[in-house]
Amino acid sequence: MQIKNFAAKYQIQADTIRYYEKENILTPKRRENGYRVYDEECEKQLQFIIVLKQLGFTIKEIQQLLLLRNQPISTECNVSTVSLLDQKIINLEEKIQFYQKALQVVNNIKGLIAEDKYIKNKEVIEELMLGFFEDTKPRRIR
């Protein structure tokens, strides 16, 4: 399969495919004329990349996981993989907490606005928004 068809199949821009190649996370074979050939192995690689991107992994983290995946099984490899996944779990849990708070604030605001009650509750709504901002803004590390 050529890049145009491969990209279309996964609803990704061809430039994104090229970027993944440049970052060595996708490695198609090449014909004698230099054209890329995307085979079943490339499809598996891209599916893996798509899932990891959806989970919030960065390109650098994906590179690291692919390197670890291609290493012989060892205690060191296992420890590195678990460590990377532990960090991602912490990150995902933080995002879940953020979105749970956001959902609660939006639901509260909706209730305060419903049935033309905005004017009456404008100050409370502003307090909720400012409170959410204060609760979620990044903390300085000292």
Image: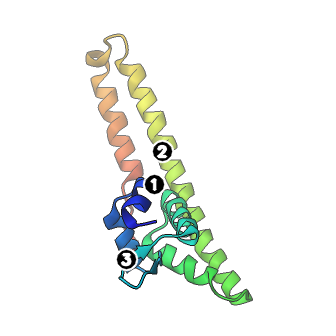
The CA distance from mark 3 to mark 1 is: 18 Å
Q: For the residue carrying disc 1, how many other residues have a C-alpha within 10 Å: few (<14), some (14-19), or many (20+)? A: few
- For the residues labelled 1 and 2, the Cα–Cα distance comes to 31 Å
Q: Earlier in the sequence, mark 2 or mark 3?
A: 3
Q: Quadrant of residue 129?
A: top left
* Nearest-to-viewer mark from 2 and 3: 3
Between 23 and 41, the residue placed more toward the observer is 41
Colour scheme of the picture: rainbow
* Residue 93 horizontal/vertical position (percent): 57, 56
Q: Is residue 79 visible?
A: yes
**Quadrant of the image occupied by residue 30:** bottom left
Amino acid at circle 2: Tyr
Residue, far front:
32
Closer to the chain start, of discs 3 and 1, is 1
Q: Name the one closer to the observer, 119 or 64.
A: 64
Q: Secondary structure at mark 1?
A: helix
The kind of secondary structure element at disc 2 is helix
The reply to whether discs 1 and 2 touch (Cβ–Cβ < 8 Å) is no
Residue 81 image offset from top left, x and y in percent: 64, 78
Residue annotated with mark 3? 35
